[in-house]
Image: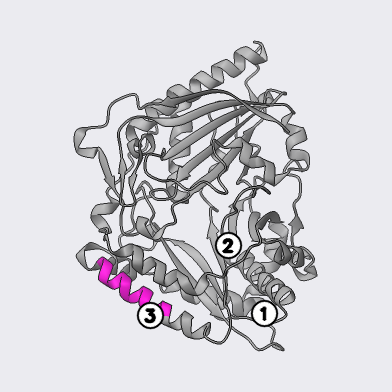
C-alpha cells in the first residue's frame, strides 16, 4: 500500500484567540502524562453519502472543503489545538493552526481493511506516531485526510498527550462533526484545569523517580495485535469474573482481568520465571470528583491505579481475584482523593502518594525485575457516533508499530468499543516474544478473536 501526500497546510481558527488565552499552562495532571502523540484513525466508505449524483472527485472536494471549514470553526473554541508546544510546562495558543494534509492511497478501503496490516497504518497519520514525540515548536494537533481509490476516506488525527486525554479527544471530534453537520450542539470546552490542579516545575524529577521500578532495558521492539471480545464472550467472562466482592463487573473489568492474567503467563513463558507484575489502569477523574467535573473539562483528568500481582511459581491467579484487585484499586479513587490533588496542596499530596508507591514497588522488585502492564480505556466515549454528514465510521483504529522505527514502550493495552456495540477491541503492544506466547494462549483464545477483519 502506497500513501502519497498531495497537499499540506495549516487550518487556523475562524476567530482569533483573545490575548488573555494565548498561553495554556499544563495542569499538575497534565504533567503526569508522557510527551507523545495520540493517533486515531476514522474510516468512512464513500457509499454512505446521501445519493449524490456528482462525480467522486466533486464529492470528495465537497467533503474536503467541509472538513476544513468546520475544523476552522471548531478550533475557535478548542484554541490550544491550533497552537504549538511552547515548553514542557505550556502551550503557545498562537492561532498558527492545526497541521492539515491530504493524501491519496493506491488501494480500495475494503482491500486495506480485509486483512489490515497494522504496521502500515502509521502512513495514515501526519507523522510516524510510534516514534515522534512533540517538542518545542511542534503542533498540538495534526490531521491527515486519506482518500482511497474507491472514494472512501480515512481521517488520521494526532493530538499531543500533554494536554489531551481520551475524553478530551472524543469531545473535540464530536464537536468537529457537529459543526460539519451544522448541528446546534456546540460544546463549550473548559480549559481551566491548570487553575484546579496547579502545576509544579519540580514535578519532572518526581515523575522520573516513580517510573524507575517499571523500566527494563530491552533492545527488542514492540509489536501490535488486536484482540477482540464480542458481546457474548464478555457475557461469559462476566459470569466467570463475578464474585462476592465484585458482584457486577463492568465490560472493561471483565476484559482486563483475562488480558492481565494471560499477559503475565506470557511473561513467565518467555523469561522462565514468575516475576511480580504491576497491572495498572487509567481512571477518568471527571466522574470520580464530588461534584463531578463536566465531560467538557479539557486536559488530562486521569489517574493511574493498579494492583501488584505476585504469586508463587505453582500458584494460579483466577479471574475473580484479578478482578477484585482491580476493583479495589479503582474504588480508592473517590471524591476525597481528587480533592487532595487540587489547589496549592496538590503537589505535596501527589508527591507523598507517588513516594509511597515508589517504595512499595521498589521493595517488590528488589529481588527480581518487575513487569508492568498498562491498561487504558476509550470505551463509552461514543466515537462511533462521529458523523461529518456522510454516515458513521465503519471502523475506528489506532496505529500499529512500524518495523523500521522506534516503538512505543511495550506492555500497553488500549481498550476500545467495537462498532457492533457491547464488544471490546483490545489493541495490545508487547515485546515480540511475549506477543508470540500471548497469541498462543488457549485460555484467552477461548473468548477472543485475534486480528479479525473489521469488515466482518
Residue 318 tag number: 1
Is residue 40 located in the magenta-colored stretch of the structure?
no
Q: Is residue 25 left or right of residue 142?
A: left
Is residue 181 among what the camera can see? no
Classify residue 93 by image quadrant. top left
Secondary structure character of the magenta stretch overall: helix
- Residue 343: x and y, percent? 22, 62
The quarter of the picture where the N terminus appears is top right
Question: What residue sits right under mark 2 in the picture?
Answer: 252
The quarter of the picture where the C terminus appears is top right
**Range covered by the magenta-colored residues:** 346-358
Going from N to C along the chain, the mark reached first, 2 or 1, is: 2
Q: Answer yes or no: do the residues labelled 3 and 1 have beta carbons within 8 Å?
A: no
Going from N to C along the chain, the mark reached first, 3 or 1, is: 1
Give the Cα separation between the discs numbered 3 and 1.
28 Å
Closer to us: 282 or 373 = 373
Residue 145 tag number: none
Is residue 357 located in the magenta-colored stretch of the structure?
yes
Going from N to C along the chain, the mark reached first, 2 or 3, is: 2
Mark 1 neighbour class, 10 Å CA radius: few under 14, some 14 to 19, many 20 or more: few
Give the SS element for disc 2.
Answer: helix
Mark 2 neighbour class, 10 Å CA radius: few under 14, some 14 to 19, many 20 or more: some
Q: Is residue 258 left or right of residue 135?
A: right
Front disc: 2 or 3: 3
Closer to us: 53 or 277 = 277
- Residue 304: x and y, percent? 45, 66
Is residue 313 among what the camera can see? yes
Residue 356 tag number: 3
From the viewer's perspective, is residue 152 above or below residue 331?
above
Mark 3 neighbour class, 10 Å CA radius: few under 14, some 14 to 19, many 20 or more: few
Give the Cα separation between the discs numbered 2 and 3.
27 Å
Amino acid at each position: 500500500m502506497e500513501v502519497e501526500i498531495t497537499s499540506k497546510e495549516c487550518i487556523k481558527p475562524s476567530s482569533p484567540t483573545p490575548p488573555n488565552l494565548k498561553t495554556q499552562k499544563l495542569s499538575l495532571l497534565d504533567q503526569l502524562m508522557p510527551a507523545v502523540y495520540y493517533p486515531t484513525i476514522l474510516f468512512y466508505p464513500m457509499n454512505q453519502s446521501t445519493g449524490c449524483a456528482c462525480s467522486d472527485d466533486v464529492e470528495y472536494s465537497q467533503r474536503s472543503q467541509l472538513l476544513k471549514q468546520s475544523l476552522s470553526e471548531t478550533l475557535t473554541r478548542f484554541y490550544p489545538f491550533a497552537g504549538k508546544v511552547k515548553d514542557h510546562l505550556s502551550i503557545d495558543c498562537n492561532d498558527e493552526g492545526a497541521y492539515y494534509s491530504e493524501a491519496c492511497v493506491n488501494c480500495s478501503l475494503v482491500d486495506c481493511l480485509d486483512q489490515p496490516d497494522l504496521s502500515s497504518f502509521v502512513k495514515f497519520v501526519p507523522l510516524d506516531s510510534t516514534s515522534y514525540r512533540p517538542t518545542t515548536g511542534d503542533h498540538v494537533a495534526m490531521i491527515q485526510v486519506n482518500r482511497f481509490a474507491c472514494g472512501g476516506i480515512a481521517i488520521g488525527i494526532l493530538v499531543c498527550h500533554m494536554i489531551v486525554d481520551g475524553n478530551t479527544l472524543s469531545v473535540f471530534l464530536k464537536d468537529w462533526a457537529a459543526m460539519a453537520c451544522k448541528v446546534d450542539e456546540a460544546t463549550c470546552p473548559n480549559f481551566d484545569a491548570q487553575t484546579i490542579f496547579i502545576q509544579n516545575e519540580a514535578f519532572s524529577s518526581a515523575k522520573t523517580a516513580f517510573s524507575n521500578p517499571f523500566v527494563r532495558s530491552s533492545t527488542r521492539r514492540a509489536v501490535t495485535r488486536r484482540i477482540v471480545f464480542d458481546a457474548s464472550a464478555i457475557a461469559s467472562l462476566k459470569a466467570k469474573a463475578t464474585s462476592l466482592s465484585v458482584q457486577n463487573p463492568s465490560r472493561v473489568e471483565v476484559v482486563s482481568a483475562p488480558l492481565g492474567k494471560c499477559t503475565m503467563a506470557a511473561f513467565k513463558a518467555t523469561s522462565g520465571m514468575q516475576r511480580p507484575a504491576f497491572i495498572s489502569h487509567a481512571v477518568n477523574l471527571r466522574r470520580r470528583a464530588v461534584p463531578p467535573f463536566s465531560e467538557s473539562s479539557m486536559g488530562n483528568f486521569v489517574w493511574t491505579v493498579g494492583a501488584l500481582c505476585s504469586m508463587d511459581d505453582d500458584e494460579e491467579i483466577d479471574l475473580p481475584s484479578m478482578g477484585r484487585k482491580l476493583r479495589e484499586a479503582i474504588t480508592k479513587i473517590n471524591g476525597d482523593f481528587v480533592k487532595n490533588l487540587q489547589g496549592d496542596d496538590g503537589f505535596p499530596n501527589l508527591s507523598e502518594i507517588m513516594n509511597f508507591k515508589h517504595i512499595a514497588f521498589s521493595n517488590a522488585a528488589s529481588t527480581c525485575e518487575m513487569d508492568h502492564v498498562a491498561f487504558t480505556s476509550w470505551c463509552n466515549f461514543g466515537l462511533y457516533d462521529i458523523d461529518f454528514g456522510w454516515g458513521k465510521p465503519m471502523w475506528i483504529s489506532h496505529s500499529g508499530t512500524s518495523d523500521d522505527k522506534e516503538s512505543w514502550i511495550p506492555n500497553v493495552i488500549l481498550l476500545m468499543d467495537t462498532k457492533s456495540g457491547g464488544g471490546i477491541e483490545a489493541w495490545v503492544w508487547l515485546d515480540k516474544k511475549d506477543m508470540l506466547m500471548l497469541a498462543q494462549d488457549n485460555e484467552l483464545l477461548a473468548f477472543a478473536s485475534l486480528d479479525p477483519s473489521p469488515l466482518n
